[in-house]
Amino acid sequence: MKKRIRFLFLLLIFSFLLFCVDEKGDSAFAIEIERSQPYEKIYPEIGYKTVEEAVRDFEEHFKRELKLPSRIPPISFTHQFGRFSNLEGDMNDTLEITFISEQESQHHFKIDIRPIKYKRQFSNKHISGVFKLNNGSDAKYMEKLSLGFNHLVFERDHWQYMLSIDKDVSNIVTPEILVQIANSIDL
């Protein structure tokens, strides 16, 4: 019986602390939860910079020009960042460009680029469809490669591109939209 009373007492105290009333009469948390930092502070801390700077670093490293798509998915983004990962050797060196939205967390689009010489290989079991691009090359669409993203992978001008879109918006950003984005490199 004492354990039950102690439990109810603790539950009552916890409830009181959780939902206190502030001086305006509004309910508020008694313990202020730290707000997350803005993306423009977080992303640079983990190696991201402007897309232009990251592309320049990538091109200088590989001594080759890079063309980017001129289109992006038809959803809203608040930020775009780039990161060139220059690891030991060239095998794992990649450029990542990410588009995100502070208001809509599922609005997340990425472009990963690496030299064809060090391209990622994909099992046929991951490929959901193959699309013909305007330049005649094939683009492989994958829905089962990773948990949170669908991907379109293609090769162009000595680079392997991987376009990735959050699965939560795949009803808006369809494989056909990703193909249009891939084809916009030619424009």
Image (tube, rainbow, N blue to C red):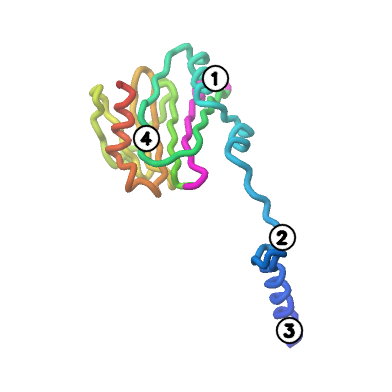
User: Residue 5's mark?
Assistant: 3
Q: Report the amino acid beneath label 1.
A: Gly
Q: Position of residue 42 (x, y in %)?
A: 61, 38
Q: Report the amino acid beneath label 3.
A: Ile
User: Residue 31's mark?
Assistant: 2
132 relative to 79 in the view: left or right: left
The residue that disc 1 covers is 89
185, above or below 77, in the image: above
Specify the segment rendered in magenta. Answer: 88-104
Measured Cα–Cα span from mark 1 to mark 3: 65 Å
Instruction: Select label 2 or label 4 by which is in front.
Output: 2
**Do we see residue 185 in this rendering?**
yes
Name the residue: 48% across, 34% down.
98
Q: Earlier in the sequence, mark 1 or mark 4?
A: 1
Instruction: Select label 2 or label 1 by which is in front.
Output: 2
- Please tell me whether mark 1 sits on a helix, a strand or a loop: loop
| Cβ–Cβ under 8 Å for marks 2 and 3 | no
**Do we see residue 92 in this rendering?**
no
Q: Earlier in the sequence, mark 2 or mark 1?
A: 2
Q: Residue furthest front?
A: 24
Q: Position of residue 186 (x, y in %)?
A: 30, 21
Instruction: Select label 2 or label 3 by which is in front.
Output: 2
User: Residue 165's mark?
Assistant: none
Measured Cα–Cα span from mark 3 to mark 4: 60 Å
Asked whether 90 falls inside the magenta stretch, the response is yes
Measured Cα–Cα span from mark 1 to mark 4: 22 Å
- Please tell me whether mark 2 sits on a helix, a strand or a loop: loop
